[in-house]
Structure formats: C-alpha cells, structure tokens
Image (cartoon, helix red, strand yellow):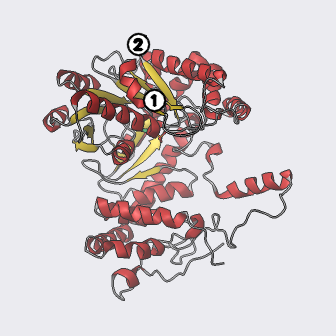
Amino acid sequence: MATANPEPNLSRCLLAGERFSFKNAVSENGTQCHLTLSANGSTLLPMRIPSQGWSKEEVFQKLEDARKADLAWRGGKAFAYVYDGGAEIEEVAKKAYASFLTENGLDPTSFPSLLRFENELVDMARTHLNGPEEVRGSFTSGGTESIILALKAARDLAREQRGITAPEVIVPVTAHAAFHKAGHYLGIKIRTTGVDAQSFRADVAEMAAAINDQTIMLVGSASGYAHGVIDPIAEIAALAAERGLLCHVDGCIGGFLLPYFERLGAKIAPFDFRVPGVTSMSMDFHKYALAPKGASVVLYRNDDLRRPQFYACASWAGYTMINPTIQSSKSGGPLAAAWAVLNYVGDSGYLEIARKLLEAKNALVAGIRKIPGLTVMGDPEMSLIAFTSETVPVFPIADAMKKRGFYIQPQLAYGPSRENLHLTIQPSNVPWVEELLRCLAESVEEAKAGRAAYEEAKATGALFAEQLAGPNAVAMLPGLVASLGVGGGGAMPSNMADINALLNALPRPIQEKLLVFFASMLFTPQREG
Ligand SMILES: *Cc1c(COP(=O)(O)O)cnc(C)c1O
C-alpha cells in the first residue's frame, strides 16, 4: 500500500502558502484520507522483459492477482461499464473469441469465414433496425469507431458532391462525446444545440437555426447515454431531408434494446430506418447485445453513402491495401464472438432479457422518484437512468453507495443537465433493484449529513476554478493533479466526491486539459517505493 504525501500540496501550487484541506475527506477512522492511494497499478522497478520466461502457471496466477482491485462486476452491483449476460453467454463468447483470436480481418479474401460473419452480422443489424435491402454497413471496434466512420463518410461525400471544405455537424448537447472526438480527429466543426430542460430531448428548432452552408449532417440519439431519452428523430430526419443534409442516428446504446422494448409494449417513437431521412446509424453489439468489447456496427441507407467510408492505398510497395474501417490488421476474435453470442442468445432470448431490463428500469424509476430529495431527469425510455437532487449533494451519494458495494456513475453538469448520478441497468443488475433502492435511501441520508463539509469542498473547488481560469492555469495543472491524490501507475484517490466537485466547478476547456494531465500521470510507471 503506497500512501502519498499526506500533506496536500494544492495550497503550495495554487493558494500560495494557504493550507488546502477538503474538510469532509475523513476516513472511517477519522483521519484526513483523501490522498490515500491504492498501489495496484504501481510498478516499483523499471520493467524489462523477463530474462527467462515465466511458467504458464505463474503467468496466469499473476494475471489473477492483478485483477484483485478491479471493479467487482461479477456480483451484479456495478451499474456501469459491463454488460453481463451470465455464465453461459460468457462461455460462448470466450470460446468463439479465443477460437478466432489469431485470424486476421485485414484480408477478407484470405479469411472468408470473417467476411461471412461480418456480412451476416451487418444484415442482422439491418433487419433489426428495419433497414431496406439496400442498407450497407461495417463491423467496427466500438461505438466511437462507428461514429468516426459515419462522420468521415459524410465529410468526404460533402467534399465531393458539394465542394465543402469546412464541414460542420450539428449535434444536441446531449450527444455522446464520440461526436466531438470524431470532429477533433476529422477536422469537422461540431456545432452543439440545446435540449429541452425538462425532457432533455433535442430542440429541433435550434438545430434548424444552426444550419448554414457548411452543414453536412444532423445527429439525434436513440437514446442518449446520459439521460436514456430518445431525441425527436422523425423531426430531426425530416429537417435534414428538407435541407438536403445527412442524418445520423446514434443507436450505439439504444439501437439493439429499444426494438425489444417496443415489442414488449413500451412507447418508443420510431427511430430507425423506418424514419424517412435517416441516412446512417450506429449500434453497439458490445453493449445490450452482450457481446465482448470490440463489437459495433455502422449502417448506411445505401452503398453510395457507405463507399466514402472505405480507404484504399496503392501508393506503397507492400500488399494491396483496402480498409473499410479504421483498423487494418485486426483480430477475428471480437467479430466471431459477436456472431456467436447473437446466434446463441437468439431473438427470443434477447426478448426475455429485455423484459427483465424493462421491468427493472420501471421499478428503479418509480423507486428513485419515491426517495425524498431525488429527481429522475427526464422520462427515460432506455434502461439508463440519470437522477439528481437540488437538496442533497449527489457525488457523496456515489461514494456512499460504493461503500455498500454498488458502483454508480457520477456525471458532471453540462448545459441544462445539472450534476447527477447515472445507472446503466444491465442483466446481472436485475436481482439487485430492491437492495439498490434501499441503499440509495440510506446513502442520501448519509450525504445529507455530510452536506456542510461537501459544500466547503465545493467552495474550495470554485476557488481553484477561479485560479485555474487565469493565465497560469496550464502550469498549475500537474501540481493540481498530484495533489488530488493521483499517483503514477494507476494509483487512485479514494474520495471521488471532492474531485468531482472540483471538476464540476472548472471551466470546460480547463477541465479537459486537467483530464489530460490526469491521464498522463495514470499512464506513467510509478518509481518511488
Ligand atoms: C457507448 C456509446 C457510444 C460510444 O461507444 P464506445 O463503444 O464506448 O466507443 C456512443 N454513443 C452512445 C449513445 C453510447 O452509449
């Protein structure tokens, strides 16, 4: 257990000598503890490839040892990051993955098995999303890659057909960060527009007003990640069609599950290829299709829209190179595993899983609404719930839940969305619904009791935020990150509420810079013992 310098040095780097202390950072034994680090990621000596290889037993033992501090998802109390369909699905996924691990998707003519899996999976996605015969697509490594590719295809098409050199894509503020990342990578300006402050659905009038002669695409989510609500897709797509623009529907998280919810009688407005004007969609298999990570699909209404996604290079001395997606050499594992899982679970299997998820979602929404002080944000159609409070600080609730074995995700304030906590309900969570609600009510009381201390931390955060808005902000960041308790090699602070309060108070550009320093420190081997 490595313990960082217990003297927080925020004061030194920021407040010129004034002692910094988050008052509520008190451990169970009463000592100031927000700098307590877990040393699981630490690497004390410079690492070299071992001169003699280890035995298999040793390798596997070390792998198991390494995961001891990881998020304990197998218990079913993690409402984020994993989509756990249970032991049978896991077995099928692992066998299929391992069995195609070494096959290379680089050349589909050498591995027709992979070509077949991909064509079949893409067609299953097409029929699932009510796409006509002409719909074409690609299997990708994840939602982010699917979104990057949809924007890349749109950019290149607009350059060719309309001569657009400074392309812009309009996304609601609730759209996934992947659109901003795509814009950053591709040189596309991402123009954000507002959402209704109650429903968190895209304001289509604002999207219309944001269109200019460089606009190439409008985006809607079905559903968004943050609040689990579906944008008015029919209106967005109609607007796009009327103005001669492309329209992408981000179904990364909702695309697979929502059709089942619809079949189970939930009120889901059409969001897929049935909607005229929808020109492309993204849908992840590695979320609610329960496939292992590295599995998503991007679909286009026809081949003309898909072709600009592909990249061929004949300007080099090596093999013939044509890459439909971003990766070049790629393992057949994720593709074979996704193919295996979809065929193993089958439509009736997914429908049953969806039934339990829908019931769990409805029970959680109703249960959270009954806890005094908590508000469910919007009216989520998806099995994703964001809840907030105007009377209780929410980030300490997440820490209190963690003590009770539940992992729930803090979300910072952005636009009309105040800071909140997020539940991604996945199959293994279902038996925990009642217990979660019970613990949540307790955690709210606990957070209420710690309110004064938290407010102080927040005020300190706001003070730092002010300093960080100054000209020396970037120079201050490394010291700030260190003082928050982040050590090299993945050492993490134990009290996240204060850190989230601080992040929440920072101007967004500064927050992004801070996060980069934070990640840089995480991905640095720790040297000091
Ligand atoms: C998860 C998600 C993405 C990004 O997908 P990754 O697989 O994490 O790259 C995009 N959009 C939505 C709505 C998502 O939930």
The percent position of residue 309, horizontal first and vertical second, equals 41, 30
- The residue sitting at the bottom extreme is 17
Q: Is residue 446 left or right of residue 215?
A: right
Mark 2 element type: loop
User: Can the viewer see residue 72 in this picture?
Assistant: yes
* Res. 151 image quadrant: top left
Nearest to N terminus: mark 2 or mark 1:
2
> Badge 2 is on which residue?
134
The answer to whether mark 1 is within 8 Å of ligand 1 is no
The percent position of residue 255, horizontal first and vertical second, equals 43, 27
Q: Nearer the viewer, residue 15 or 386?
A: 15
* Res. 268 image quadrant: top left
Q: Which mark, by number, is residue 90?
A: none
Quarter of the picture holding the N terminus = bottom right
Distance Cα–Cα, label 2 vs label 1: 18 Å
Mark 1 element type: strand
Q: Sort mark 2 into few (<14), some (14-19) or many (20+) by Cα contacts within 10 Å.
A: few
> Badge 1 is on which residue?
283
Residue positioned 33% across, 19% down in the render = 270
Q: Sort mark 1 into few (<14), some (14-19) or many (20+) by Cα contacts within 10 Å.
A: many
- Residue 294's place in the image compared with 257, above or below, is below
- The residue sitting at the front extreme is 317
Q: Amino acid at mark 1?
A: Met
The percent position of residue 288, horizontal first and vertical second, equals 52, 31
- Residue 370's place in the image compared with 56, above or below, is above
Foreground: disc 2 or disc 1: 2
Residue positioned 34% across, 71% down in the render = 474
